[in-house]
């Protein structure tokens, strides 16, 4: 048996007018609260051996390095020397697109907020720490069991949103059609159940992949979306202080929307869930997830995997801009590697089903400009040679078919470092205005706009391994990653591997090499290039090998550590109400005054 504790705390960081994180649109701001947001924590300890693992699932768009750093610092302040470290703490997000932004050190994810918002950051750090402290205080002797089950095909819970991309994969024998998108997802839910020694159900955490985008980008209320509703339904039914977390799984190309509605506007997207009312659709989808979790929780003991062995963990910081990929994961290619982070034009176009970004006309026109920039840079490199040629050649080699829009590590947009001189006028799209404001106010001139040094992590709970990383991963990419990790960890007796995305930090997507070539939204947001999946497999293979060694003899080497950001740097781009929002408030005030 283990010492097990479950806890839950509020993290509803509401700041009126600040942007929400997920859709990346200037008008998706916080104007009200539909549901509260929570952090749910699970502490698992083997006190005889002095080991402890802590998993926290947060109702947020993603986790940032800033957030984990802040939580660890707060835990150390409240509970000195209590065993919470980078290795033993795993922070994950269920990826709601209707939660607060403004808590990242890296500027690219603060542009639509716009800026870093200290009060949001502090509320999140405090709430997550409160959940962990509550779990710590609630520890009792108990057991953990693992079980899993698949959704039947007639359950309208998850659908592949990127058919063309998915069908590129050689594993896909039965190609998807618009009528069979429900088959192009991983329909399995995996669940850990926590039970006290006296039989009391303490809580559970499960992983199932479906985007938390039932609530669309034209709704301006904080909402925990389908997974949040699932948690509330389960906790209400179980009663007491039961903690039920619905963590995010393999959802990179998976949507809860499946009904085409031509009456919708383009910017919102033409797709609905079960109902035209998005909140009802979120509840419907959450209810399906809740029912599946209840089914798994009721699995007879003899059909579950009882966990009572070793607790182990490891974390490695990887510089994802320079991973030389193992040929075992590249079909024998000996020269496959990653490069500096770049967001493609397909990323700026958004996800067609879950929420479009820039208008297709603008995307196409900008793509033409980017092709000319590529031609100009390669021609210039041919004549200049030397270091410049090496940089340009490596950039276009690693990024492959992508049209390179935002070079977040090199701090360049459309080929220039002088963002205020962009040929695209700010009045054409408020997002351009925000980019220019970011450039003018930004104090991170010597820091990347998005992370290049990122953590990968592994928890082992007896014969179950949690494989955690800071990306969104597509269905087939996750299948390949899981298979390679399982192959390595079976040497240590691991029977089940759970894929845990959105963990500890964030930097875009992971697609397969084949998916990347067609450059849909997910490929455009696979920032480290066409061999990103192979790089992730390579680094996890290294971490697995290290985890096979006894802990006292283990040597996990970090490529580097993330840069430090000073208070002055963060304050260079603080939260401010952009011009259009200020005008909106003035109009509302004038309207209310006239009514009086």
Image: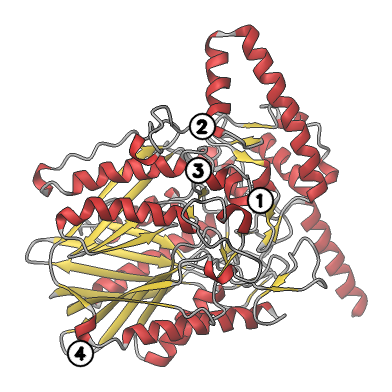
Please, is residue 418 above or below residue 331 in the view?
above
Q: From this viewpoint, which residue is outermost toward the left?
A: 48
Question: How many residues crowd around disc 1 within 10 Å: few (fewer than 14), some, or many (20 or more)?
Answer: many
Marks 2 and 3, how far apart at CA: 17 Å
Of residue 256 and residue 447, the one placed in the foreground of this image is: 256
Instruction: Indicate the position of residue 354 as horizontal and vertical percent values.
Output: 65, 63
Label 3 sits on residue = 513
Label 2 sits on residue = 340
Instruction: Indicate the position of residue 307 as horizontal and vertical percent values.
Output: 18, 72
Marks 1 and 3, how far apart at CA: 34 Å
Label 4 sits on residue = 199
Q: Which is more foreground, mark 2 or mark 3? A: 3
Q: Residue at x 59, y 73 (%)?
A: 223
Which quadrant holds the C terminus?
A: bottom right
Marks 4 and 3, how far apart at CA: 48 Å
- Residue 571 is left or right of residue 546, and the answer is right
């Amino acid at each position: 048996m283990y010492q097990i504790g479950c806890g839950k705390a509020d993290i509803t960081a509401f700041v009126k007018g600040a942007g929400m994180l997920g859709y990346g649109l200037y008008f998706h701001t916080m104007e009200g609260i539909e549901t509260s947001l929570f952090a749910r924590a699970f502490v698992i300890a083997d006190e005889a051996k002095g080991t402890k693992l802590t998993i926290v699932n947060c109702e947020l768009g993603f986790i940032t390095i800033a957030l984990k750093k802040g939580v660890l610092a707060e835990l150390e302040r409240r509970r000195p020397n209590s065993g919470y470290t980078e290795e033993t703490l795993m922070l994950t997000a269920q990826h709601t697109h209707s939660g607060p932004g403004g808590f990242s050190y890296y500027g690219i994810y603060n542009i639509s907020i716009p800026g870093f918002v200290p009060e949001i950051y502090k509320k999140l750090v405090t709430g997550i720490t409160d959940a962990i402290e509550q779990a710590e205080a609630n520890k009792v002797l108990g057991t953990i069991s693992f079980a899993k089950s698949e959704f039947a095909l007639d359950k309208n819970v998850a659908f592949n949103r990127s058919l063309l991309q998915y069908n590129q994969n050689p594993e896909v024998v039965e190609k998807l059609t618009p009528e069979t998108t429900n088959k192009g997802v991983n329909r399995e839910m995996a669940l850990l159940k926590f039970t006290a020694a006296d039989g009391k159900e303490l809580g559970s955490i499960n992983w199932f992949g479906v985007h938390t985008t039932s609530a669309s980008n034209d709704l301006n209320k904080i909402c925990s979306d389908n997974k949040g509703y699932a948690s509330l339904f389960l906790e209400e039914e179980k009663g007491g202080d039961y903690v039920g977390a619905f963590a995010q799984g393999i959802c990179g190309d998976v949507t809860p929307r499946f009904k085409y509605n031509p009456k919708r506007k383009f910017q919102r997207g033409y797709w609905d869930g079960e109902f035209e009312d998005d909140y009802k659709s979120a509840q419907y989808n959450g209810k399906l997830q809740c029912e599946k979790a209840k089914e798994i929780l009721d699995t007879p003991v003899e059909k579950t995997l009882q966990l009572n062995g070793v607790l182990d963990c490891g974390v490695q910081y990887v510089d994802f801009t320079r991973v030389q990929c193992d040929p075992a994961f590249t079909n024998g290619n000996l020269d496959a590697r990653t490069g500096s982070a770049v967001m493609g034009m397909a990323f700026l176009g958004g996800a067609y089903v879950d929420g479009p970004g820039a208008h297709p006309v603008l995307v196409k026109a900008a793509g033409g400009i980017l092709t000319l920039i590529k031609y100009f840079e390669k021609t210039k490199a041919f004549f200049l040679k030397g270091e410049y040629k090496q940089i340009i050649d490596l950039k276009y080699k690693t990024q492959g078919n992508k049209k390179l829009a935002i070079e977040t590590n090199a701090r360049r947009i459309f080929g220039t470092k002088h963002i205020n001189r962009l040929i695209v006028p700010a009045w054409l799209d408020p997002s351009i205005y925000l980019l220019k404001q970011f450039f003018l106010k930004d104090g991170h001139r010597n820091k990347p706009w998005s992370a290049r040094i990122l953590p990968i992590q592994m928890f082992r709970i007896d014969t179950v391994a949690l494989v955690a990383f800071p990306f969104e991963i597509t269905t087939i990419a996750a299948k390949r990653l899981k298979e390679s990790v399982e192959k390595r960890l079976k040497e240590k007796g691991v029977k089940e591997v759970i894929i845990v995305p959105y963990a500890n930090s964030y930097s875009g997507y992971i697609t397969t090499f084949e998916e990347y070539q067609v450059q849909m939204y997910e490929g455009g947001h696979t920032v480290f290039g066409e061999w990103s999946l192979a790089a992730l497999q390579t680094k996890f293979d290294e971490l697995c090998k290290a985890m096979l060694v006894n802990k006292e003899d283990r040597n996990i080497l970090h490529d580097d550590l993330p840069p430090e950001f000073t208070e002055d740097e963060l304050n260079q781009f603080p939260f401010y109400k952009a011009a259009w929002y200020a005008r909106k408030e003035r109009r509302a005030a004038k309207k209310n005054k006239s009514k009086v």
